[in-house]
Image (spheres, rainbow, N blue to C red):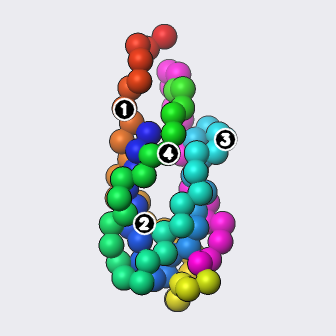
Amino acid sequence: MTARFTKAPDHGTAELSIDGQKLADINLFHDRVIPSSPERLGSVKLGDGQHVLTIRTIDADPRSTGSRYGFGLDWIKLTPTGPAR
């Protein structure tokens, strides 16, 4: 699982999880609005059916301004790593 985020002066740190499994904490602060580099979020085993991606802002960056807890997601890419079982 890979994703690209938006970084900005009013963004903080977000925690991402899927189906309750923590993937990563991502600090999205930057002194100007820019896209992040693609971030590897790790591997997860997804079975049939629906899955829930949870994004929770957990901290403000001390340098951030405005809301300080902003979050921006550009895209998520899921790449199969093996045969479906």
Say which residue label 1 marks. 79
Earlier in the chain: of badge 3 and badge 1, it is 3
Q: Is residue 41 above or below residue 71?
A: above
* Residue of label 3: 20
Question: Is residue 69 placed above or below 77 in the rendered structure?
Answer: below
Quick one: label 2 or label 3, which is nearer the N terminus? 3
Residue neighbourhood size for the residue with mark 4, other residues' Cα within 10 Å, grouped as few (<14), some (14–19), many (≥20) = some
Residue 53 is left or right of residue 74, and the answer is right
**Neighbour class for label 2 at 10 Å: few (<14), some, many (≥20)?**
some
- Spatial separation of the CA atoms under disc 2 and disc 1: 21 Å
The x and y percentages for residue 71 are 48, 68
- The disc at residue 41 is 4
- How far apart, in angstroms, are the residues tagged by discs 3 and 1? 20 Å
Q: Which residues are magenta?
A: 47-61
Foreground residue among 55 and 14? 14
Q: CA distance from mark 4 to mark 2?
A: 16 Å
Q: Residue at x 41, y 71 (%)?
A: 7
